[in-house]
Amino acid sequence: MAAQFPRIKPAERSFRLGQYPVKSYRALSGATVKRAFGNRPYGYELELSFNNITDDATTELLTHYESTSGGFDRFTLPDTLFAGMNTALTSKIQSPSQIKWEYVSPPEVRSIIPGRSAVRITLAGEIDYL
Amino acid sequence: MTEIRIAQYLKLATTAQTLRYQNYFVAQSSSFLSETYDFAPFRAEGALASLNGDNENLRILFPNVEVALRLLEQANGNRLSDLTFATAWLNANEQVINTVTDYYIGIGASYSETTIELRFRSAVDSVGSAFPSRTLTRDLVGPLPLNSELYLR
């Protein structure tokens, strides 16, 4: 199992709740029938932006990505990422039931000035049932 | 009712033990007909009936994980298993309100890098109208067949 995500405060956060496993059938009349196949949402999304962070912090973020075998292993998120949110909201996002996080794509690094970079990371929360 | 919650309950009896799994309540156990079913991420495909009375075929697909491998080993490649497969409709409180149950026998399995497929055939089959209207017994025909491959001679 990969190490916990680095304790670095992001400049921006964007979160989308997971969806339930539902399929819909729409008849020609427009009437729909919906079928649910599970009782847990999946596919949470969290985007994190780190602006003007040091090279050391940037390296720490990239090292974490590598430690997950390039996004293969799942991990948990530290409280630091959710600074400013109250406890109830943080628990909804940080650790939904049976959810662990994984990288959707490799981190994107943009150089700002010498020694300072901006890093953008996109994570997905998927069901970890074992 | 246009919102339907569907749970599938799988009871697989092998020579070694009986395994019970369901695929709706993630990481939870579910009680069905007074028995406890653990969660497993399987899906079922392909049960069809035809006018010719061919056996129904059913495929149960598991991800290639330890529990599915163990299940295969115990059932000798899924050739010695009896499957009771129930599809349950749940209400908004996730209580079972209706079920359809089918019975199958294992006829084999196959692997891929991501999936383990267990193949089953219906345990009871129809007999065509051209067949003599007599009851098949072991005294008349010897060992009774398990499939629809019967021949009139």
Image: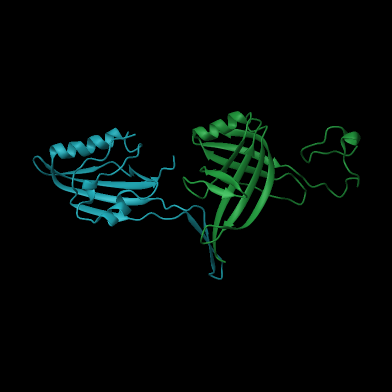
Chain colours: A cyan, B green
The quadrant where residue A92 appears: bottom left
Q: Residue at x 52, y 57 (%)?
A: B94
Q: Position of residue B47 (x, y in %)?
A: 65, 48
* Residue A3 in picture, x, y percent from top left: 28, 35
Asked whether residue B42 appears in the rendered view, the answer is no
**Up-down: is A95 above or below A69?**
below
Quadrant position of the C terminus of chain B in the picture? top right
Residue at image location 24% in from the left, 49% down from the top: A48
Image height check: is A23 above or below A120? below
Q: Nearer the viewer, residue A60 or A1?
A: A1
Q: Position of residue B141 (x, y in %)?
A: 88, 35
Point 38% across, 54% down: residue:
A18
Query: Can residue B29 be spotted in the picture?
Result: yes
What is the x, y in percent for residue B68? 54, 35
Q: Of all residues shown, which one is farthest toward the front?
A: B34
Residue that appears at 17% across and 39% down: A58
Instruction: Give the number of callouts.
Output: 0
Q: Nearer the viewer, residue A60 or B6?
A: B6
Image quadrant where one finds the N terminus of chain B: bottom right
